[in-house]
Image: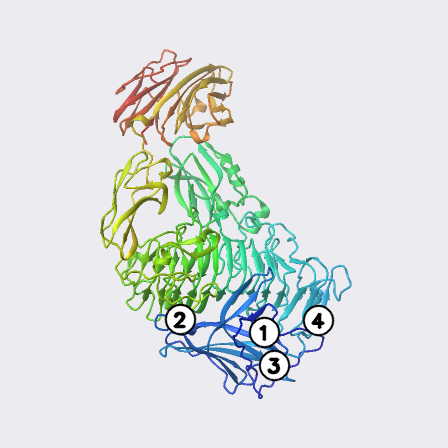
Amino acid sequence: MVGFGFGTGFGNGLSRFAQFASNQPVNQGLRPSSIWDGSPSSGFSSVPADPARTTAKPVCRLLTPPRQTVRTATVIGAFAAANNGGSLIPNLGLSHVDFHCEGNVSRVDAPTFRTFERADGSTYDLLGWWATLSRPSGEEGVADVYVEAVPSDGSMQSRMCGPYSFVMASSEFDFDVSVAAGGGADFFTMEDAFTHLRTQNAQHPRVQVLEAGDYELGNANSHTPAGWCRIEATAPVKFMQAPPALEGDFARIRPGMDRLHFKGSEITVDFANSLEFYTELEEGQHWLDGINIIQSRGREDLWRLAPRNFIPALFRHGAWFTDCSISDVNDVFDKAPLVRGCKTSATWADLAQDSLCFVANEVFDHSSAAYYTNVDAISISYVGPGNATVSIRNSPRSLVLRVDGSDVGSFVFDGSEQAFRDDTNYRVASATDWINSQPNWSAMLLDDTRLGTSLSPPGTTNGFAVEDIAVPTTLPTHFDIHSDIYQLPNLPDFRENTVFAFNRMWQIDAQNFFVQASPGVLDCVVIGNALYNNLGTADEELRSDLGGMISHGVFAHNTMATQRVSIPADGQGGDGYSLIANNMVLRMTVRNGDSISPALSVNDNHLVQSVGLPAGSNGTSSGGDSTSLFIDAINGNFTPSGLLLGNGAAPSIASDLHGTEFPDLSTKGAIAASATPSSGDPPPSWSVAPSITGIPEIGQTLTGDDGSVANGMINGQQWLRNGFAISGAVGTAYTLVAADENSLITFAVEATGPGGVNSAVSPEIGPVIFSPSPAQEPMLIDSVQGAGSAGSATASNLVATGDHRQIFAMVGAGTSDAVNDISCSIVGAGGTVAMTRVFFVGTQNVDPTTSLEAFAGFIIEETNLPGEGPYELVATAAGANVPDKVGIVAGSLTNAPKVPVIEFERAANVTGAAVADGTLVLAALGSSTATSGASMTGAMQVENLFSYGDGIQLGWTMAESGPLTVTNNVTGRSVSALVLFEPG
């Protein structure tokens, strides 16, 4: 006989938070047999074993955690189900479920509902197979329970799960101690309490916290009891780790005591100062029961400038979760054997990666948008000779400066803890300082809140390495964190026996289900879930991938009106035991447009868009959208409406997300409602798909063709931008607007017929580009000039109006010695901004620092202008002696491209090719004599030709395509530049 020490205890083995619905029996017959001697599995003449899988098996997972103490009796339960010829009706597709306990067997013939109450007073009904486990009078010890799910389909195998241990004891706790930081209890600290329980070899103790406040759990060295060490509180308490001794150190909660059962709403576990809750042994998982789990600094809080998911699991080895309230944490349910009845908000990263049983939960606002949103961090410029670019590289993460295709410098980032403390190459600021130390390069720090290894290419959606980003440029920081709800990770072997059922989720940004085929999952049931994914986010295009459902994958009565589903392709997965039925999803497609397995049943689904639906599906209806098919899906009300009420089908499961019975002819999706049948006629279909003609340029008008439809009449057209409706863009014509730039446009057509409503979408056209019309060709707005001495010159009142504005300036300086530097800034209502220098050359020599005269060209784009004009341009020049002559000429233009073509020579002439009609060419001429003159070949018009001092001149011309030559009548000590602003 196994002994359990001494101490006091009390309690009722039946939870006050759960009860059976009326008229539903509780099986009282499960208890160890008379030959059980108190040690685990001693009552079995032959210990139950799960047979090696040779064909499909039911799923079977516990709905109540094991290791509970049974004084008199306690209810235990499991969720078990299997596909039975295309349906889980009746009895979730099973013949029965047997509960085995130490030589006795209790048979349960049907699943029933049990009602659970959360701490906030809300309730939920959960369908399961339940039995009441009793303790034999006068006996104590540890008893093992196995649960056997027996399928109705005789071609399947049964599944035997276990062993699950339970403590049989006359006292609920073998030791019962108290903690209060202010005294008046057995111990001042939790660590002292745990140390005492370890030295006493406690097996199912309790620790009560009697005083409100913040407590550390400490580290009492390793101890794993046979049952649970229950933690309760009589006043609000928060368990959290103290801040690490050194800022940025990795920190975890590691109490040493395994199998902690935190129970009750007075308890909060706060991860503000820690990244992980540690479990010493894999079988030592903790139980979080009706408590609060938070990260009190908020979802966006970083740990040493990086996301907190250093380890992609908040609880090491997973944990048991029942009825908890959870917010602002990442990866909370990773590897959890059970997540039941929890409510979450403001969570991020992966919610339930590799969770084994996820049932009856409510998830609101799960998103990693704060991490994948780009934050501009650094702007980089170059003023030397040659074509400058920068590259972002990996292994190690580096920022590389390049000129004319060759590396000229590299800054290697280090994201380690030591580098954070050393602060030499951890931050973006360090890279900024380094760039500013490189000849001809400059950088401006815009944001330093994220670590340097997150520095990424402009516009990135994944942070991948990219070569040769044109300079000038602005680089953002980016964290490639895109959320998943359930993800099956890469595993060495198949994952068997997973359940994801009866969950409600709304306002989420995530890939709902990502079941990888590497190698995949066997025996998986995903039923009765309703999810609403936010529209208009970077994650909007994510899709659920069921390709890894290899054998006996059931995906039925799920609602996902704003996310499409990719189902297994032939040869990938989906056998004769698999079922995809009665779902309501955005679209249903197959990888690469492949066919599905002939054995896979795809029946009675409703799609918003039927495009891409594979051949072999039956009973599919389509039409509507997330606003018309539900009462208020965006706020979590998935009650069916609209077309869902008119395209009913026989259900494949007996009850819905809320426990309501599906009628014989019901709506498709997760929520039950009576529906009228479809007519039986085929839905409208297209022999020729819709199409688009026109040029994908802003301002152009596209024309949509309805295609050729059968079994119906066209009743509407809608233009789509990146797959989503453009407000007000209906009918067969659409004129592209600025918001369409870089987008893909499609044309959707809806038809109605006796068989219902269907839609088809054209192939994409685009991406849409900005291409100015003749009236929008680059145009000169204004030009100014200014002269000065003593190292500076100013040109005032430059007007710059219109869209896509740009300003170019040329500055010349002369001295009795070398010219070391020339710079130019622009002053407006928003302050002063440095212009980007695009060339800097001398007249006597290429190197201006060895030349008596030098010229420099400068450009600034509209996005960098300091507010509205008129503007003042201020040029400064420096040398061994202060330059005694400085001149500046500048012009502004509208409808300019972001990157003009610049050609310049230290010669009397320079030639450039205008590759498009309507190119605006600016000619900038400088020489060492004031009598310099200019001529341009191919010029149609020359405006604002002027000069100053040593000879700085600007002229503008509209040119046809072809070569343009600018001639300067002074040779030897002159600079000529062409700046070509091409349309679009």
Q: Position of residue 860 (x, y in %)?
A: 43, 28
Label 4 belongs to which residue?
Answer: 176
Q: Which amino acid does label 2 sit on?
A: Leu
Task: Return the residue at label 2.
Answer: 88
Amino acid on which the number 3 mark rests in the picture: Arg
* Depicted 59 relative to depicted 566: above or below: below
Q: Can you tell which of label 3 and label 1 is closer to the viewer?
A: 3
Q: What residue type is labelled 1?
A: Arg
Q: Do the residues labelled 4 and 1 touch (CB within 8 Å)?
A: no
Q: Residue 862 carries which label?
A: none
783 or 841, which lies in front?
783
- What percent of the width, then of the height, locates residue 921? 32, 23
Compute the Cα span from label 4 to label 1. Answer: 17 Å
Q: Which residue matches tag 1?
A: 67
Q: Which of marks 4 and 1 is nearer the N terminus?
A: 1
- In primary-sequence order, the first of circles 2 and 1 is 1
Q: What residue sits 56% from the left and 77% below the top?
A: 132
Separation of marks 3 and 2 at Cα, in angstroms:
34 Å
